[in-house]
Image: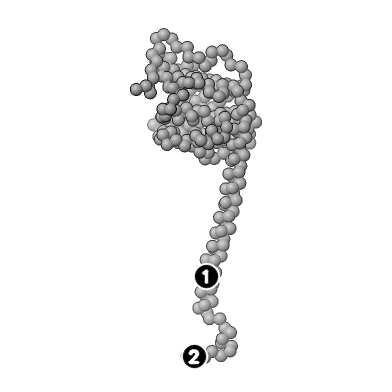
Amino acid sequence: MPVLSPVEAKQPDAGATRALRRGAKPLRCWRLGWVVLLGCLEVLTAQASEISTLLDRWCAAQTNIHTWTADLTQTRSLKVMTQPLVVTGKVWVQLPNRFRWELGLPPQTIALRQPDQLLLIYPRLKRAEKYPINTAQSGPWKDALALLDASFPRNRAELESRFQVLSATQTNAVLQLVLQPRSAAARKFMTEIHVIVHTNDFAPVATELRFSDGSRLRSDFTNAVLNAPLREGVFEAKLDPDVTVVEPLRP
């Protein structure tokens, strides 16, 4: 066995030095990775806190909204068409459970929600479809109705029971929320709903429904009026005698 002189014994082995250097690089990378990860977690936590605050403000503001009316422009974008379909109309809302949508002039489609039922009326076709609301039966139509209600959530617990909030972004005086239905049945045909509201009164600016086939349905609202008296009978169904009423969900 060779014997090292005192001078040689003090010199570090070259191979060991290289090994130490090789080991130091992964150690530095590992530490840097943790720093980056912690930084990302801090950003995500801040974003989650901001989203939570915006949701609380949005839901709290709904208690101040009793009626709402607006003109609307509805745009349907389909993959099979180069140009979108555009139609104008009007909407009336009385919270918590009444609304009326009219599309076309004169109206070609009327969606009328009453406390116990939803009516879809097609005046030109002399046809109306009736869907019960206060029933245990579920289905895509009921999930779609819940999506329409997403524009005016009564409280945060109710909102989050129906939707997962994917994002909430505030730009100037506008807040945009992206919601995904929790119902698997709803997600089969509608993947997301975008709700865009003013931050001064949290009334809707626009909504956009995104469907699983890639199509989109956007409604832009103008000339909105908040908490004004509505004309009498706006939520009543006045059907002509020659209109055929069907109930698609009845066995």
Image location of residue 168, percent across then percent down: 57, 39
Image location of residue 207, percent across then percent down: 52, 30
Seen at 50% across and 21% down, the residue is 115
Q: Amino acid at mark 1?
A: Gly
Q: Which mark is residue 23?
A: 1
Image location of residue 1, percent across then percent down: 47, 90
The residue that mark 2 highlights is 2
Q: Earlier in the sequence, mark 1 or mark 2?
A: 2
User: Dot 2, crowdedness within 10 Å: few (<14), some or many (≥20)?
Assistant: few
Q: Which mark is residue 141?
A: none
**Which residue of the protein is positioned furthest toward the front in this rendering?**
136
User: Dot 1, crowdedness within 10 Å: few (<14), some or many (≥20)?
Assistant: few
Disc 1 and disc 2 in contact, CB within 8 angstroms: no
Q: Amino acid at mark 2?
A: Pro
Seen at 52% across and 28% down, the residue is 149
Query: In the structure shown, which secondary structural element does the residue marked by tag 1 occupy?
Result: helix
Residue 46 visible in the displayed image: yes
Image location of residue 36, percent across then percent down: 57, 56
Seen at 53% across and 33% down, the residue is 158
Quadrant in which the C terminus is drawn:
top left
The answer to whether 40 appears left or right of 239 in the picture is right
The answer to whether 78 appears left or right of 158 in the picture is left
As measured in the structure, the alpha-carbon distance from the residue carrying label 1 to the one carrying label 2 is 29 Å
Seen at 56% across and 65% down, the residue is 28
Specify the quadrant of the image occupied by residue 228: top right
